[in-house]
Amino acid sequence: MITDTDIFQAELRRWVERYEQHLDQLPVLLEHLRDRANPMKAGSLEERVGGGGGDTPAPFRLDPVDDCDDLWSSLVEYIGEVAERLQDPAPGAAGASWAVKGSVRGIPAWMGPDEAYRAAYELIAWLIDRAEKVHALALKDSEDHLFSLIRKLMTRYVIPPIERPSHRRLCIGEDEEGRMVGCGERAVVVDWIIGDVGEARCAVCGAVYTREEDTHD
C-alpha cells in the first residue's frame, strides 16, 4: 500500500534530482562564459564594459560578459535568499561579486574561467548540502528564474548537460502488452535540462521513459 509518506518521499526525490541537475551545470557554464568573454585585463573591479555606439571595440565579447553577469547575480541573489530564510551564513564565494551600492550586478572582473569554476562549485555544494531544507522553503519563483536562465544559456552556448551517475536507475519497463523490456543496466538518467520535462533515457540501449513511467531504483 502506498502511503502519503511514500508519495512525499518520491516527490522529494524527484525535486532533489531536478534541483541537483540544474545546479550541476553551473561550474562548467560559468567557466565557459568567462572563457568566451576573453578579458584583456582592462578596468578595475568597479569598471565594467558596456554596449553602445562608437567605433572603438570593447575589450570583452559583450554577450558572454552580460550572460555571465546575469547568471552569477541570479545565483548569488538566490543563495542570499536561501541563507536568510535558513538563518545560515552564505558561503564565502558569494561575497566575490561585482556590486554597486550593495546590489549584486555580476561576477568580479578578476575572476577568470578557473576561478569561476571553483567559486561556482563552492556555491552549488552549499546549496546541495541543504537541498531538503531548501525544498521546504518553497522558493519556486526564484528557482524557476535561475533554472530557466541556466537552460537558456546551456542551449545558447551548446553545452552538453552534466549527468550525475548516482541518479541513474535500472532500465526496466513494460511494453503495451505488459511484457518486461529494457536492458537491465543502471543507465537511465532523468534529464531536467532539455525542455525541463523530466524525460528519462537509457544511455546504453536508448530506451525513453516519459515522466509518468517508472524505472526501478
Image (spheres, helix red, strand yellow):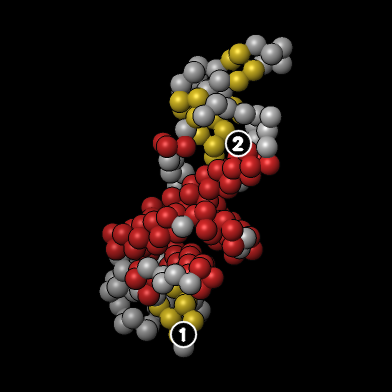
Judging depth in this view, the residue of 32 and 37 nearest the camera is 32
Judging depth in this view, the residue of 144 and 131 nearest the camera is 131
Does residue 202 appear anywhere in the picture? Answer: no
| Residue 129: percent from left, percent from top | 42, 55
Label 2's element? strand
The tag on residue 199 is: 2
| Residue 126: percent from left, percent from top | 40, 60
Does residue 178 appear anywhere in the picture? Answer: yes
Q: Is residue 2 left or right of residue 142?
A: right
Q: Residue at x 47, y 77 (%)?
A: 105
Farthest residue, direction bottom: 101
Residue 17 to residue 75: above or below: above
Whichever of labels 1 and 2 marks the residue nearer the N terminus, that label is: 1
Quarter that holds the N terminus:
top right
Q: CA distance from mark 1 to mark 2?
A: 40 Å
Q: Is residue 211 left or right of residue 182?
A: right
Label 1's element? loop
| Residue 190: percent from left, percent from top | 54, 37
Q: Residue at x 33, y 81 (%)?
A: 45
Q: Amino acid at mark 2?
A: Glu
| Residue 119: percent from left, percent from top | 34, 63
Judging depth in this view, the residue of 187 and 6 nearest the camera is 6
Q: Amino acid at mark 1?
A: Gly
The tag on residue 102 is: 1
Q: Residue at x 65, y 29 (%)?
A: 213
Q: Residues within 10 Å of mark 2 (few under 14, many from 20)?
A: some
Q: Residues within 10 Å of mark 1 (few under 14, many from 20)?
A: few
Residue 85 to residue 214: above or below: below
Residue 4 to residue 35: above or below: above
Tell me where residue 122 sits by quadrant.
bottom left
